[in-house]
Image: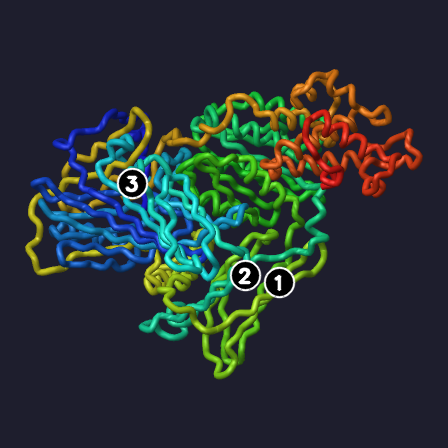
Amino acid sequence: MSLCCGLLTIQKAPGTKMNCCGLLTAQKEPVPLKSVEVEVEVRDHVATVVSTLNYENKEDKPLEAVFVFPLPGDAAVCHFSAKIGQTEIVAEVKEKQEAREEYDDALSSGRQAFLLEESDQSPDIFSMSVGSLPPGESASIRLEYVTELAVQADEGLRFCLPAVLNPRYQPRGSEGNPVQVTSVPASLVPYSLSFSARVSSARPVSKVESNCPLDPLQYLNTEQTQATVKLSAGHKFDRDVELLIYYKDAHQPTAVVEAGQASAKPGTLMGDPVVMLSLYPEFPQAVMSSVASCGEFVFLLDRSGSMAGALMNCARDTLLLLLKSLPMGCYFNIISFGDSYKHIFPKSVEYSQQTMEEALKKVEEMEADLGGTKILDPLKHIYSQSCIPNQPRQLFVFTDGEVTNTKEVIDLVKKNSGSHRCFSFGIGEGASSALINGVAKEGGGHAQFITGTDRMQPKVMQSLRFSQQPSVVDISVKWDLPEGVSVTDLSPPITALFEGQRSLVYAQLTGQSSEATEGCVTVKYSLAGQPSQNQLRFSLKPAEDTGLTVHRLAAWTLIRSLEMEEREHRGERDGGVKKKKVVELSGQSGVSSAFTAFIAVNKGDGEAIQGPLVRRNVPTPTQFQCMMLCDSGASHGGGGGRRCGRRLTSQGLHDYHNFFSLGHHMHSHRDPLLQLVSLQKASGCWVLDSALAAALGKTSREVQRPKPASVKQDVWATILALIWLHGFKMDAQEEWELLAMKAVSWLRENGQNGNSQNNKCCFNSCCRSESPVCPLTECVEAGNTLLGCRVPKDVLRL
């Protein structure tokens, strides 16, 4: 379970807005939610999350409590139950409209009922309704979900408990009713949060880090393969809870076979064993050592109001690094968006010194002044433009906002996935994991989240390196199983592979083998025109104590694929077939979907609750000084009509979001690294002038004096810049590595020494010796002396 930050404004009627400030007193609106307890069990790269919400009605009337909250976009909700006194009610999964009607009927008859449903517009927003809670009664709600953990650039596995639900921008004409969410300062949230995690793996747990204060990691065995960690007391509701889990030798292919459910029918997904493969492709080093010198790079930047200040400064610095790191010969464009969108060039242009300077000038003028987050229109504009021959399109999407039409955006990216790769970046607390992961997955790219004190630049540059890897095509998965065992793929086809990045594959195994106990899977693909493959052998023996986690994740994967197919065929004659399959699979597996909901009704023999219900919207934390409180105190009868807040969308909202600390670490003035980078030419070289000298912390005379006479000024300047990067900024190497490689390439082409006997480039093979005719040794030694560091000449060969 997670907490959320509510809407700042909400429309009462078209053209009007209701705004309130301050927290209403307990006498006017008591809060029924008392505490939230979260327990996480992490096994390798899968997490099972169990949340318990404790409610208590201290009023003299029966009430209904509504809580709207975010979950990870790839969470498979698989259990929902309520305990009232000694009575436990386990919810059933039913078709959504049927569940809503059953909930309303229960309330109209005065019975206790509980409803949990996913947003119609975005799979990472849920609402929970606790209905007909009698005066003086307590209820304990249990929610469970399973989720895969994303692999980070530093090999850590990321678990995030969303704590922020930002206002979601809804374009005009979109369907949906406003959602009612009460917002209060974090210090005034009247319920508590406790959080603990247990981590176990076949490999030792190296460490666990977090953006929130943690108690010390406690190992449970001498092998250090099991450990527990807790959130420190006094945690404020002002940020997502993020855990980074590190294992030794984490990037190893694995396979887990899970036995089917004993009560399920053989031949069904839940009745048969399911295998989960975790694949880490290894590409030939000869291919990986080459960097693509072509491509069309389109950068789509959010300029909504919430990007103002430090976030916008960081975005400008990131674009600087990106533009300096692009290869010569490529094409590029920058498009920014909010309520409308703007482009630097009408269409992508060839990368040159002139176009780079023109783009950087306009980037420096960018402000967060475009209003909301209307991302669909600029995407349509990009896709409407023809691709440039032999320049594969790479789309980079940066946004801190969230939208209500998430599914529509993802569907558009998938529709155009054959023409590009999409790399996405979620900035700040509450960034929609459904949106960020969805566009990257369907666009064949890679998703990154930038929160807390993360620097944006390293993650962006990693994705730029991915974008310059050759596209992997003709991907296929081939199974080699014993006679008598057949396989049914449950995952959609793999559309993208990157060096060292995990790919998960789920499959259903039907039948048995009397003798063989091992299977094999082979992933075949074409890379840079060369056929390649990776193979993994695995045991068919089911793992112990997996608790149907693999089955539920597999069911969720198949459900999401079917949902997308249903949206693609909506309106066609057989468009409802996929929906019917989703409802059936959701009911069998107990995993929520867009078309189903969890419903629990107390059908005991006790007397029906009398009197009108008082509706209470559970307040959620925010850091804004002025917040909106919905008019949620109005009571209503037990009729079956729809009530405000059931549809989880909002109208006419500007997305002024809650960013708790992102950007506090960012400097208001450009740091020395960015100052040096800003002086690099598009070709990769630097110019020997006063600006370079200042960036190096020297005077022009100090920089000029030690230059060897036979060395050109721009060669000397470029060598000095490389020495400074290696000598003083190795901790940020992943940020400048690509532009340094471009500098070295320029030196190889332009570093000739006309006075030397061999007339060879400074970085040719003669540099490996101490030949006096090669100026590299003299240049590096002079540069080391000047800058006060010791960088060997071989380092500059990169």
Q: Which mark is residue 253?
A: 2
Residue 774, quarter of picture:
top right
**Residue 7 location (% of width, % of height):** 32, 33
- The earlier-in-sequence mark between 3 and 1 is 3
- The earlier-in-sequence mark between 3 and 2 is 3
User: Which circle, 3 or 1, is nearer the viewer?
Assistant: 3
Q: Is residue 765 left or right of residue 455?
A: right
Q: Report helix, strand or loop for mark 3.
A: loop
**Residue 641 location (% of width, % of height):** 20, 45
- The earlier-in-sequence mark between 2 and 1 is 2
**Residue 425 location (% of width, % of height):** 51, 39
> How busy is the neighbourhood of tag 2: few (under 14 within 10 Å), some, or many (20 plus)?
some
**Residue 747 location (% of width, % of height):** 78, 34
Residues at marks 2 and 1 touching, judged by CB atoms closer than 8 Å: yes
Q: Report helix, strand or loop for mark 2.
A: loop
User: Which circle, 2 or 1, is nearer the viewer?
Assistant: 2
How far is mark 3 from mark 2, CA to CA? 38 Å
The one nearer the camera, 455 or 10, is 455
Placement of 409 over or under 656, stated as above or below = below
The one nearer the camera, 762 or 378, is 762
| Three-letter residue code for mark 3 | Ala
Residue drawn at 31 percent across, 55 percent down? 144
Q: Is residue 331 shown to the viewer in this render?
A: no
Quickly name the residue at label 1.
Answer: 534
Quickly name the residue at label 3.
Answer: 233
| Three-letter residue code for mark 2 | Pro
